[in-house]
Amino acid sequence: MNDIVDSQTAKSYGGSKPSVMEAIKKGLRRKCPCCGEGRAFSGYLKVTGECDVCKTELGDIRADDFPPYLTIFIVGHIVVPALVYMEAILHPPTWLQITLWPTVALALSLALLPVLKGGVVGMMWALGLKGDEQH
Ligand SMILES: [Zn+2]
């Protein structure tokens, strides 16, 4: 069944399914991991049911906690060193530190989360994962 869907999808887009890296790159742009043209999201984080260009089914892919994990990992590795560096070198007033860094962390998280979710959805699509696999 999955092979039939893949061959139908591949047939409509140049005869080959995109590689995992290509699918991730398309997903990071919040586009369909198959064609790279249709939107992969119908809202801020809501994955669309199917691509409006190539009709690839995306709605049953569950990325779960991986995009937030990646977001926290990246934002933490940006904000914490910047906070420590600023404190050690510039010695800013406390009110500035306690208002600046939570705001920066929130803004970065809100900006990165949908992008990273697109990349994860692209990776999962390319690997044929739905997020409901049993171990
Ligand atoms: Zn598409």
Image: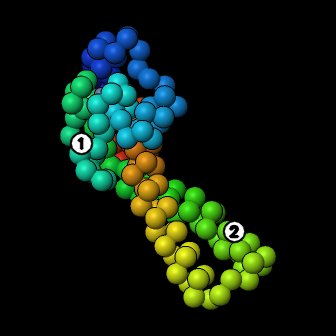
Q: Which residue is mark 2?
A: 81
* The N terminus - image quarter: top left
Residue 81 rendering spot, x and y as whole percentages: 69, 68
Give SS at disc 2: helix
Q: Amino acid at mark 2?
A: Pro
Would residue 103 appear left or right of 58 to someone viewing this image? right
Q: Which residue is depicted at the point 37% across and 28% down?
A: 36
The CA distance from mark 1 to mark 2 is 36 Å
Residue 73 lies in quadrant? bottom right
Viewer-nearest residue: 78 or 17: 78
Q: Residue furthest bottom?
A: 94
Q: Residue furthest right?
A: 89
Q: Is 120 rendered above or below residue 83?
A: above
Question: Which of the marked residues, 1 or 2, is nearer the chain's N terminus?
Answer: 1
Which of label 1 and label 2 is nearer to you?
Answer: 2
Assess disc 2: are there few (<14), some (14-19) or many (≥20) residues with their C-alpha within 10 Å of its C-alpha: few
Label 1 near ligand 1 (CB < 8 Å): no
Res. 27 in view = yes
Residue 69 rendering spot, x and y as whole percentages: 49, 60
Q: Which residue is depicted at the point 30% across and 20% down?
A: 9
Residue 30 lies in quadrant? top left
Give SS at disc 1: loop
Q: Which residue is mark 1?
A: 48
Q: Is 55 rendered above or below residue 134?
A: above
Res. 133 in view = no
Residue 127 lies in quadrant? top left
Viewer-nearest residue: 90 or 103: 90
Viewer-nearest residue: 61 or 37: 37
